[in-house]
Structures are given as structure tokens and as C-alpha cells.
Image: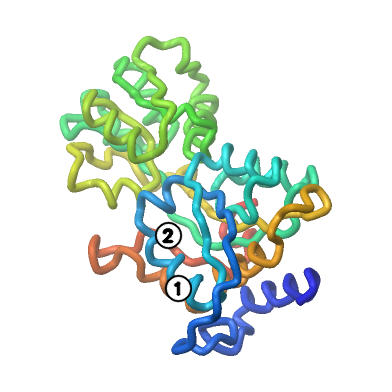
Amino acid sequence: MSLVAALVAIVALACGDDGDAHGGQDEATDVPHKGDIILATTTSTQDSGLLDVLLPIFEKRTGWTAKPIAVGSGQAITMGQRGDADVLLVHSPDAELKFMAEGYGNERFLIMHNDFVIVGPGSDPAGVKSAKTAIDAMKAIDARSATFISRGDNSGTNALELALWRNAAIDPKARSWYQESGQGMGATLQIADQKTGYTISDRATYLALQKNLGLQVVNEGDKAYFNVYHVITLNTERNPKINAEGGIAFAQFMVSKEAQELIRTFGVDRYGQPLFVPDAGKSEDALGVK
């Protein structure tokens, strides 16, 4: 299949014109193994367990085996720039748009969303629960000099956090209560728990690890917490060594009805609620994202 034809197929799938749930594959048939692809993705897709559900089905349907490297979105995007990945699954819209504008990406597809939450000790010493907005929550943490653990890793979560501090007119790095873990979401949650501090987490990772944490959700619901994920296929003209065929196959799978249904139901049986909302084929303008 040519690159253009494959991308047309992706658009058709995203619009619900795939004919069946598997993009034309027989559910009972395993496709012969074609090779491996490197998937640069975020820690939230791995820590939440979503990849454990999606990737075995992807391999069965397509014959490609995805080898995920879970890092912050910024690091994943850098991997794409260097040609060290074949496809990206990330959640840092501003960085993604810059990546596309610089010609590293070929196509970018809306896949799903969830939201961020502020978590902290149940005693809530900073009074974050009473904050009406995300900005008010950040100001409350600053006013009480409450311990805050930042990922500090150029991830999508870190980008959102820093934007909230900027909008609150606060420079947290000048504050003694502000600490950077330099690690992924799961490790950062554990550090915040150990230090009885606050942090910002995507809801999926928090719910997946909640039973091992004393942290509680103390602020949520502001539209500023919206967290959207895209798949980006890569431009072989920038990096000829990229496995474009495998990357396109992953994008096709992620917008397929089968994958979107798996996303829609993921977490319901364990947490009583889905951890992500499927969005393939939806208007980004309607969702209020870029």
C-alpha cells in the first residue's frame, strides 16, 4: 500500500467508514508477523495499563509488534525528531503542533482524551478542595507553601502544570516547597505520597495506582485540565529509516472501531468508570482542542 493510500484509509477509519471493527481483518485470523515498530508514547498509556490491552490486539490484527518506549511527551517527540521511533502516541498539543510545523510529522490523528487532576493528602493542608478553578488551586498551594512535586521532565503533564503556574503568575522554581522528580507519572505520584505533598496527574494513572497511595483527588473539573492524545505518523523525508508502513498500521488500528471500543470500556470493570474517552473521527473544534 502506498503512503497516500494508507493515509486515506486512516481518514476513512476515523470517520467510521471501515466496514467492520478491525479495519477489514478477520477477528479469528492471526496475521503473519511482519516485524517490529518502535512506539514512542507517554508514561500514562503504560502506567494505566491501556497498552497492555491494545498492543496484543494490534499485533494480532496487523502482524506488527509494537515495542513501546514510555517517556514524557517531550522526550517522545524528540525521539520522533531523531528518527528513533516509528510512530508517536502523545499528549502535548503545543509541542505536537510545533513538531508538525517543522515537518517531522506526516499526519496527526485525534485518538482519545481524559483529564488531569490535582491530588494531595486527604487532610488538604493548602485548602485546594475549596478552590473554584485550577488557577485558584495553584495559588492556594503557593499561599500555604505546601509541598508540590513536579515531574520536571518536559512531559505533557509537566507542560500543563507549568502553564497553570504561569497563568497564576507564580514562579514555582523560586519556591523552597517546589520539588522536581525528573521521573514519570507513577514514580512522581509515589514521591508526592511519601512527602505528603501535592502533584498534578492524569486521571488514568492516578486511578490505576490509587490503591497503593494515600493521595486523594483534591481539585478537578476545570476545562484547563482537559488532556487530549494524538497519534502522529512520521515523515520519511526527514528520516528515511523510519518504518512508515508499521507506523501507519498503528495509526489505522488506533482509529479503528475495535480499538476505540477497547478505549471506551477500559477501566470500567475495575474502577467503575472509563479511564479514557475515545475521540477518533470527532471534530477537534467541538472538543475545544488544537
**Colour basis:** rainbow
Taking the spot 62% from the left edge, 73% from the top edge, the residue there is 14
Which residue, given by chain and number where applicable, does mark 1 sit on?
57
Q: Residue at x 25, y 28 (%)?
A: 127
Task: Name the image quarter holding residue 95.
Answer: top right
Residue 125, numbered circle:
none
Q: Position of residue 53 (x, y in %)?
A: 38, 66
Left or right: 12 as drawn, with respect to 212? right
Which is nearer the N-term, disc 1 or disc 2?
2
- Residue 275 placed where, x, y %? 36, 59
**Quadrant location of the N terminus?**
bottom right
Say which of 287 and 106 sits in front. Answer: 106
Asked whether the beta carbons under mark 1 and mark 2 sit within 8 Å of each other, the answer is no
Number of residues whose C-alpha sits closer than 10 Å to that of mark 1, classed few (under 14), some (14–19) or many (20 or more): many
Residue type, label 2: Leu
Quadrant hosting residue 19: bottom right
Q: Is residue 178 above or below residue 40?
A: above
Residue 51's label in the rendered image is: 2
Q: Position of residue 122 (x, y in %)?
A: 17, 34
Say which of 266 and 246 sits in front: 246
| Residue drawn at x 35%, y 44% as measured from the top left | 220
The kind of secondary structure element at disc 1 is helix
